[in-house]
């Protein structure tokens, strides 16, 4: 019996993996990080002018961190909020209302707390305050 791949209608039910701290990502990496197939990413490049990966060596695409975030935002608009391509394009052109932008950006305290937790996992014998210079 053949297994069916989940459609984009099922997208958004599982959390996406964290984005690694790298400068550039290949189309395959972005596909995995965003839950979107490479051919869909190439199509979105034509539809969303904001999405412009760097092209090097034989037209290979390299996405930067902000573009990975943009792909996730486009995915959210199309798959979870039910926007059409045109509607998602318009929403991105409008920008986020300030309240929505504030709620989606982690606070400095939250980031610091997460870093402390990571430091504690990596160096349980060292004081986490010493790791972060406090």
Image: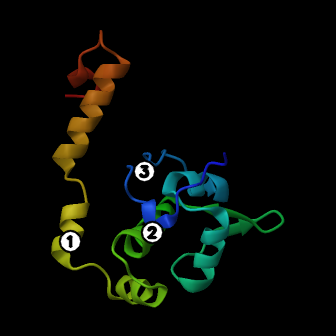
Decide which of 94, 75 is in the foreground and name it. 75
x, y percent for residue 56: 76, 65
Circle 2 residue: 75
Which mark identifies residue 100?
1
Q: Is residue 16 above or below residue 123?
A: below
Quarter of image, res 54 = bottom right
Q: Quadrant of the C terminus?
A: top left
Q: Residues within 10 Å of mark 3 (few under 14, many from 20)?
A: few
In terms of secondary structure, where does tag 2 sit? helix
Report the residue that reaches farthest toward the right.
58
Residue at label 3? 16
Give the CA separation, mark 3 to mark 1: 20 Å
- Tell me how far mark 3 sits from mark 2, CA to CA: 11 Å
Q: Could you tell whether 103 is left or right of 43 in the image?
A: left
Spatial CA distance of label 2 from label 1 is 17 Å
Q: Secondary structure at mark 3?
A: loop
Labels 3 & 2 near each other (Cβ < 8 A): no
User: Which SS class for mark 1?
Assistant: helix
């Amino acid at each position: 019996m053949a297994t069916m791949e989940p459609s984009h209608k099922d997208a958004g039910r599982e959390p996406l993996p964290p984005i690694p701290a790298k400068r550039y990502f290949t189309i395959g990496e972005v596909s995995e990080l965003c839950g979107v197939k490479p051919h869909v990413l190439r199509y979105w490049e034509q539809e969303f002018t904001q999405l412009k990966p760097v092209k090097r060596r034989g037209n290979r695409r390299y996405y930067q961190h902000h573009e990975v975030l943009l792909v996730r935002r486009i995915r959210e608009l199309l798959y979870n909020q039910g926007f059409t391509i045109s509607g998602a394009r318009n929403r991105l052109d409008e920008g986020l209302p300030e309240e929505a932008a504030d709620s989606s950006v982690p606070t400095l305290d939250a980031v610091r707390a997460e870093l402390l937790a990571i430091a504690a996992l990596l160096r349980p014998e060292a004081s986490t305050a010493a790791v972060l210079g406090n």
